[in-house]
Image (cartoon, rainbow, N blue to C red):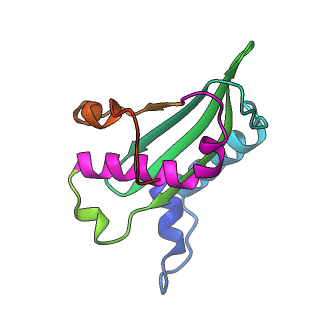
């Protein structure tokens, strides 16, 4: 999506090239087709998935019911200039902390523990903690 985000830069001409148009079509398709967001249910198993790239963080809050896993909410943001210098494991951990803070109200209302998924193996020790106090 860098072709689209580069169109937002100040003092640069707005040139909608083929790559940006293609990315826009992908986003349009994603926003108008399933899976549609579901309502949050405090009694269902809940999953927080996070991922970090060189320049952004993304997270998905989903729940599992009889028909499978359904998205509840998702969000992303571009890293700040200082955050771009973080090591990848720090970016991944920042993504987890950010997502837990972002969905704090949902997660605190759950009647059961929730699951956090990340693709970075060095964060396994953090994930095994029984209680997190910074939330």
Q: x, y (%) of residue 128?
A: 33, 29
- Given residues 43 and 19, the one toward you in this image is 43
| Residue at the image position 74 percent from the left and 12 percent from the top | 66
Left or right of 120, for residue 43: right
Exactly how many numbered labels are in the figure? 0
- Start and end of the magenta stretch? 88-113
Q: Could you tell me which residue is drawn at 48 percent across and 87 percent down?
A: 11
| Residue under the image location 79 percent in, 37 percent down | 39
Q: Position of residue 120 (x, y in %)?
A: 29, 34
Between 40 and 30, the residue placed more toward the observer is 40
In the rendered structure, the answer to whether residue 132 lies left or right of residue 65 reads: left
- Relative height, residue 27 to residue 85 (above, below): above
Looking at the image, is 79 positioned above or below residue 62? below
Question: Quadrant of the rendered structure where residue 61 is?
Answer: top right
| Residue 18 in sight | no
Of 76 and 123, nearer the camera is: 123
Query: Within the magenta stretch, is there residue 75?
Result: no
On the image, the x and y values in percent for residue 94 come to: 36, 53
Main secondary structure along the magenta-highlighted residues:
helix
């Amino acid at each position: 999506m860098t072709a689209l985000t580069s169109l937002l830069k100040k003092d640069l001409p707005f040139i909608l090239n083929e790559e940006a148009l293609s990315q826009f079509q992908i986003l349009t398709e994603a926003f108008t087709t399933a899976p549609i967001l579901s309502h949050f249910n405090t009694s269902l198993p809940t999953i927080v998935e996070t991922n970090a790239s060189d320049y952004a963080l993304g997270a998905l809050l989903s729940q599992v019911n009889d028909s499978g896993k359904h998205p509840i909410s998702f969000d992303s943001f571009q890293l700040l200039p200082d955050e771009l210098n973080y090591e990848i494991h720090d970016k991944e951990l920042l993504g987890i902390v950010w997502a837990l803070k972002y969905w704090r109200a949902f997660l605190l209302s759950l009647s059961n523990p929730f699951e956090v998924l990340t693709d970075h193996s060095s964060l396994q020790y953090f994930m095994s903690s029984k209680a997190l106090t910074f939330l």
